[in-house]
């Protein structure tokens, strides 16, 4: 019976792959046809042909991306109906359904049905594939009547198998084993702000990514043009998760670390926690506004300006009046400046005209020439700029922090000590904490060259033009396509996305990356507890609809500007219009280790929502006490044992500052290129890393050096040690010369 089941599933899965191959062939044929149609000249315009080709290439890439574990489940319903669940929906040519997309409403039973709430499901079957072959099947029988022994396939359990698998340094999707509490969050309605709080390893990142894929599937129309933004803490974290969405067949999500949210700027972490806290605080709103206002100056007295040999007068009163009128337009600084300049130039031209006419005994002068003379005059240009200097956000913020006189003038609400913290040389690199200040400045300054119009307006016009071109192209090529047997249904919107030619062809989401004023349809924030007030402000600006999924763990906050409570962090932006969901099961860390971490946190006074670990591990946490100066020596001595325990997986050594450096050097001496120098070194199997870089990542084995140093490090918080201790999927070792933080060794 069991073998019969297995061969039935093998046969069916073979059929699914055959259908996938057929679809690929079809797309490939369409691609070739488009290219051929271009070559024989039926399709006149090369860029049209390229747009079609690009679109088919992308569709083909999507079909290629779902190759691995194409199908993973089957549901048997009360009425005898069966339904296969996989990465995408598949149907036959005559629309008989072969497989349902995991995101479709009817697939939710696969994740939600239980013996208590069967939802019409008699049996849930997991199909475990290797390549294209079904290797094993596992059944959850939900209907007791089916439990006659003969139809039940038991195994380790698909979930446990996934959890025990070796880590590769890259996150994998969990689509085949999403748990019910996770599924409810993934499928939650889109509008509004949803906060997902969960302890370490509860699958917050996994949920965030699967939710992005789900939203794109279920709100495709809206999100296709607006896009989804996914924000994470660091570029190494983004690298860690970058493969998940493509494996779910989704490429339409913009992924960005917090340091990259301002187009054109790549920011480094803010080294000093006090500076990060200050720059993240709400007080920066007034500081940046004051810095902008400071660039508009009314001269103390009259100024004489020379134009073509005539002396014109610029009075403080004139400047003040022009400034007030310009400000009254309500436009941003650089755009309002145009009004200011126009008013002053007009007045100065009038002055010049009357002077010229007076000296020419009443003959009228040509006003347009005079206006040009005024505009060209160096004196006038200098005077106008002194009153109202055109500014870029980079200039504004750089000068604010590097020019003592400016910061003293606008920062009167800050203490002397705070101003000293902000001061730095003009050529300092941008930091993550600067990014929201630059964004704030950009918002107040507006476009530098207002004559080119607002970026958004330009984009809109471009999009309209692309759409018109696409409609025209569809008309033009319709006949040619039919001639060569191209029967795909294409809409102009789709094609417009590809109109810009191969090098510039981008989805709407990709275009959003380079545009600060882009309004996203939805934003997903991971490790959201780290965000400062100013970073939230920036993000809310990027999604005026305030449609957010916010995932994080308050207990893991390590940024000095980060949140100590969701309510405090979110109320300024969302009021009470956000809902809180909790994830309660830890899928990563074995129980013995998770409990030690939770006891340590409790002893150190950190309130944690310690989730329940889903499995026991093989090992208790190991604590090694060593004599003075012996930490690295012990590390070298025990590493072979740890590598063996990792069994081909990853070993991470987590340490602070100089100890991390010494450990890395020593390990490099012994293991050479196998040792990676940070979170980004995914190809190596031994990684030395600090706790902040480790955030969000996981490893088979973790060795923490000098845990007490993580606890009292001047930049650190209890959260850092808590993060470090909750990274392993199998085994944890602590090596300490100093005291072992309380709680860790207490009996279970
Ligand atoms: N339903 C699931 N099926 C299989 N694996 C899962 C499931 N849920 C979570 N995992 C695995 O558990 C691990 C932890 O998940 P994830 O990194 O998303 O947790 P997290 O809550 O973001 O953790 P942290 O806050 O510690 O960064 C990952 O390896 C993830 O693949």
Image: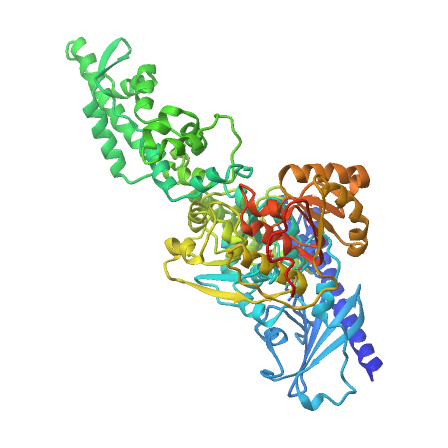
Looking at the image, the residue that sits furthest to the front is 627
Depth check: give the residue in front, 232 or 18.
Answer: 232
Up/down of 383 relative to 250, above or below: above
Q: Image point 75% across, 76% down: which residue?
A: 138
Where is ligand 1, by quadrant?
A: bottom right
Depth check: give the residue in front, 521 or 172.
Answer: 172
Depth check: give the residue in front, 93 or 245.
Answer: 245
Is residue 40 visible in the rendered image? The answer is no
In the image: residue 404, left or right of residue 741 = left
Where's residue 562, x and y in %? 48, 49
Where's residue 75, x and y in %? 67, 79
Up/down of 394 relative to 98, above or below: above
Could you say which quadrant of the image residue 174 lies in?
bottom right
Where's residue 722, x and y in %? 59, 54
Q: Quadrant of the C terminus?
A: bottom right
Is residue 148 visible in the rendered image? The answer is yes
Up/down of 516 relative to 566, above or below: above
Instruction: Count all numbered tags in the image, as a single digit.
Output: 0
In the image: residue 16, left or right of residue 415 = right
Up/down of 392 relative to 194, above or below: above
Could you say which quadrant of the image residue 131 lies in?
bottom right
Where's residue 463, x and y in %? 49, 48
Could you say which quadrant of the image residue 248 lies in?
bottom right
Depth check: give the residue in front, 7 or 2.
Answer: 2
Q: Image point 46% across, 49% down: which residue?
A: 539
């Amino acid at each position: 019976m069991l073998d019969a089941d297995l061969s039935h599933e093998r046969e069916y899965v073979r059929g699914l792959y055959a259908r996938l191959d057929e679809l690929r062939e079809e797309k490939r044929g369409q691609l070739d046809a488009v290219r051929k149609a271009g070559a024989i000249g039926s399709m006149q315009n090369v860029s049209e042909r390229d747009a079609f080709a690009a679109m088919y290439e992308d569709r083909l890439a999507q079909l290629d991306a779902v190759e691995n574990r194409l199908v993973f489940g089957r549901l048997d319903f009360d009425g005898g109906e069966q339904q296969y669940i996989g990465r995408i929906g598949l149907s036959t040519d005559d629309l008989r359904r072969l497989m349902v997309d995991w995101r479709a409403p009817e697939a939710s039973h696969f994740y939600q049905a239980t013996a208590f709430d069967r939802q019409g499901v008699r049996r849930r079957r997991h199909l475990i594939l290797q390549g294209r072959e079904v290797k094993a099947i596992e059944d959850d029988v939900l209907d007791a009547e089916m439990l006659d022994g003969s139809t039940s396939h038991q195994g380790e359990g698909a979930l446990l198998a996934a959890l025990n698998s070796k880590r590769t340094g890259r996150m994998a999707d969990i689509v085949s084993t999403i748990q019910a509490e996770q599924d409810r969050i993934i499928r939650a309605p889109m509008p509004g702000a949803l906060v997902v709080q969960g302890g370490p390893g509860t699958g917050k990142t996994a949920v965030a990514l699967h939710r992005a894929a789900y939203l794109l599937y279920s709100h495709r129309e809206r999100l296709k043009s607006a896009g989804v933004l996914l924000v994470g803490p660091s570029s190494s974290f983004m690298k860690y998760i970058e493969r998940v969405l493509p494996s779910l067949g989704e490429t339409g999500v913009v992924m960005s670390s917090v340091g990259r949210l301002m187009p054109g700027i790549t920011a480094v972490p803010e080294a000093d926690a006090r500076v990060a806290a200050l720059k993240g605080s709400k007080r920066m709103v007034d500081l940046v506004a004051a810095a902008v206002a400071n660039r508009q100056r009314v001269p103390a007295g009259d100024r004489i300006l020379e134009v073509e040999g005539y002396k014109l007068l610029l009075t403080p009163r004139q400047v003040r009046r022009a400034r007030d009128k310009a400000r009254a337009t309500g436009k941003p600084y650089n755009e309002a400046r145009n009004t200011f300049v126009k008013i002053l130039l007009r007045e100065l031209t009038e002055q010049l005209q009357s002077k010229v006419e007076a000296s020419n005994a009443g003959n009228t002068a040509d006003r347009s020439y005079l206006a040009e003379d005024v505009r060209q005059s160096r004196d006038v240009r200098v005077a106008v700029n002194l009153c109202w200097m055109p500014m870029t956000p980079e200039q504004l913020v750089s000068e604010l922090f590097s020019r003592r006189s400016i910061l003293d003038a606008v920062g009167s609400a800050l203490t002397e000590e705070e101003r000293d913290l902000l001061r730095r040389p003009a050529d300092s690199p941008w930091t993550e904490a600067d990014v929201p200040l630059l964004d704030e400045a950009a918002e107040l300054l507006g476009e530098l060259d207002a004559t080119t119009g607002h970026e958004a307006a330009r984009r809109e016009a471009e999009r309209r033009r692309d759409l018109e071109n696409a409609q025209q192209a569809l008309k033009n090529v319709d006949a040619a396509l039919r001639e060569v047997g191209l029967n795909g249904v294409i809409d102009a919107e789709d094609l417009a996305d590809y109109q810009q030619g191969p090098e510039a062809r981008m989805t709407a989401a990709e275009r959003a990356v380079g545009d600060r004023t882009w309004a996203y349809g939805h934003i997903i924030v991971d490790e959201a507890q780290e965000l400062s007030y100013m970073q939230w402000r920036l993000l809310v600006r990027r999604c005026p609809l305030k449609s957010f999924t916010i995932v994080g763990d308050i207990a893991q906050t390590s940024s000095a500007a980060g949140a100590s409570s969701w309510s405090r962090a979110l109320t300024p932006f969302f009021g009470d219009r956000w809902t809180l969901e909790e994830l309660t099961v830890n899928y990563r860390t074995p129980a013995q280790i998770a409990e030690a971490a939770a006891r340590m946190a409790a002893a150190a006074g950190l309130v944690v929502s310690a989730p329940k670990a889903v499995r026991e591990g093989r090992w208790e946490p190991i604590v090694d006490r060593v004599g003075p100066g012996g930490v690295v020596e012990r590390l070298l001595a025990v590493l072979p044992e740890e590598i063996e325990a990792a069994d081909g997986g990853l070993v991470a050594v987590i340490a602070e500052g100089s100890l991390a450096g010494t450990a890395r050097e020593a390990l490099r001496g012994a293991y050479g290129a196998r040792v990676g120098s940070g979170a980004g070194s995914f190809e190596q199997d031994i990684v030395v890393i600090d706790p902040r870089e480790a955030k969000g990542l996981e490893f088979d084995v973790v060795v923490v050096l000098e845990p007490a140093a993580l606890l009292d490090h001047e930049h650190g918080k209890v959260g850092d040690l808590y993060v470090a201790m909750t990274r392993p999927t199998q085994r944890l070792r602590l090596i300490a010369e100093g005291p072992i933080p309380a709680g860790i060794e207490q009996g279970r």
